[in-house]
């Protein structure tokens, strides 16, 4: 099924400060969508609205034809929305393979679809290029491999929507390229991928780059270097 995540007119306020003011965002299947903006503009807040960690004052979040605005985070995961964190969150005492296997096993339990966790794990390790690292402990990995492991753990839950918070932070340009290439391939294979970043050059390489500015989303075009409040909404 083709997944489409939609954020509609979302508003979030902290105290007297409005961070999101009618934000609209589409995250279609088959595309790599990026959300970019300077620190503090509200990217993580919007990301958390999608994952269910942030309540909204107004607006809606939809996955295909289901409204999920009030759904708990774990229920969203079960619907196929997977996320990675800014700081890798793998289980430190476990190997790379075991970490992916735990995610695949969790998914098998809730999905009850007869999936084979070991087979899923092997596929994920192959797909992400993690196979050579499979026996390494996850707390002893180079940063780029830790990032890949985060993506691998998310993929093991068989998501339809993949959300990534700063997936290339702290990586070299070459490593960042490799992550972006993988995300582009996953999108081409049918996933709806949303990556959040403060790096405009990186964001502009997405198929569907979006800028967050003053609480709203706008298409990011290469010719625009500053905020673009007068553009059509994304
Ligand atoms: N739980 C909270 N309570 C109060 N203020 C918050 C809370 N979460 C975020 N904020 C504020 O909302 C604004 C947006 O924060 P957010 O983390 O979403 O921005 P960001 O664009 O993701 O920035 P960064 O790239 O630094 O993570 C900031 O001013 C932040 O201080």
Image (cartoon, rainbow, N blue to C red):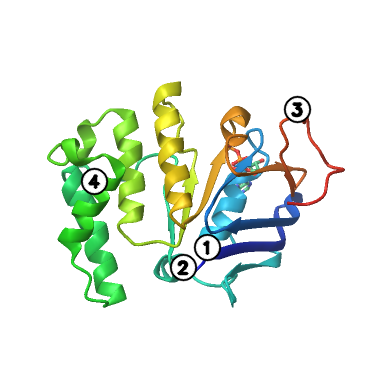
Residue mark closest to the camera, 2 vs 1: 2
- Percent of width and height locating residue 219: 73, 44
Q: Is residue 90 above or below residue 9?
A: above
Assess mark 4: CB under 8 A from ligand 1? Answer: no
Assess mark 1: CB under 8 A from ligand 1? Answer: no
Label 4 or label 3, whichever comes before in sequence order: 4
**Local secondary structure at mark 3:** loop
Q: Which mark is residue 14?
A: none
Q: Residue at x 26, y 51 (%)?
A: 124
Label 3 or label 1, whichever comes before in sequence order: 1
Label pair 2/1, CB-CB below 8 angstroms: yes
Q: Residue at x 71, y 31 (%)?
A: 222
Q: Is residue 229 visible?
A: yes
Q: How far, Cα to Cα, is label 2 from label 1? A: 7 Å
- Percent of width and height locating residue 130: 24, 40
Q: How far, Cα to Cα, is label 4 from label 3? A: 38 Å
Label pair 2/3, CB-CB below 8 angstroms: no
Asked if residue 37 lies left or right of residue 206, the reply is right
């Amino acid at each position: 099924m083709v997944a489409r995540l939609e954020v509609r007119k979302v508003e979030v306020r902290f105290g007297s400060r409005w961070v999101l003011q009618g934000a609209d965002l589409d995250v279609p299947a088959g595309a790599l969508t990026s959300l970019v903006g300077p620190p503090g503009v509200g990217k993580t807040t919007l990301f958390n609205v999608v994952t269910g960690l942030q309540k909204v004052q107004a607006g809606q979040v939809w996955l295909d034809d289901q409204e999920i605005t009030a759904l708990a985070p774990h229920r969203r995961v079960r619907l196929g929305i997977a996320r990675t964190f800014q700081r890798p969150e793998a289980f430190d005492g476990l190997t790379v393979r075991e970490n992916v296997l735990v995610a695949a096993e969790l998914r098998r339990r809730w999905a009850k679809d007869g999936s084979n966790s070991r087979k899923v794990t092997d596929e994920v390790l192959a797909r992400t290029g993690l196979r050579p690292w499979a026996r390494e402990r996850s707390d002893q990995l180079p940063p780029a491999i830790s990032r890949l492991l985060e993506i691998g753990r998310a993929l093991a839950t068989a998501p339809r929507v993949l959300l990534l918070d700063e997936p290339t932070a702290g990586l070299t340009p070459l490593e960042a390229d490799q992550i972006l290439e993988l995300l582009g391939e996953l999108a081409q294979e049918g996933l709806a991928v949303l990556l959040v970043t403060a790096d405009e050059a990186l964001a502009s390489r997405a198929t569907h780059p979006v800028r967050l500015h003053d609480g709203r989303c706008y298409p990011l075009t290469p010719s625009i270097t500053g905020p673009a409040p007068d553009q059509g909404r994304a």
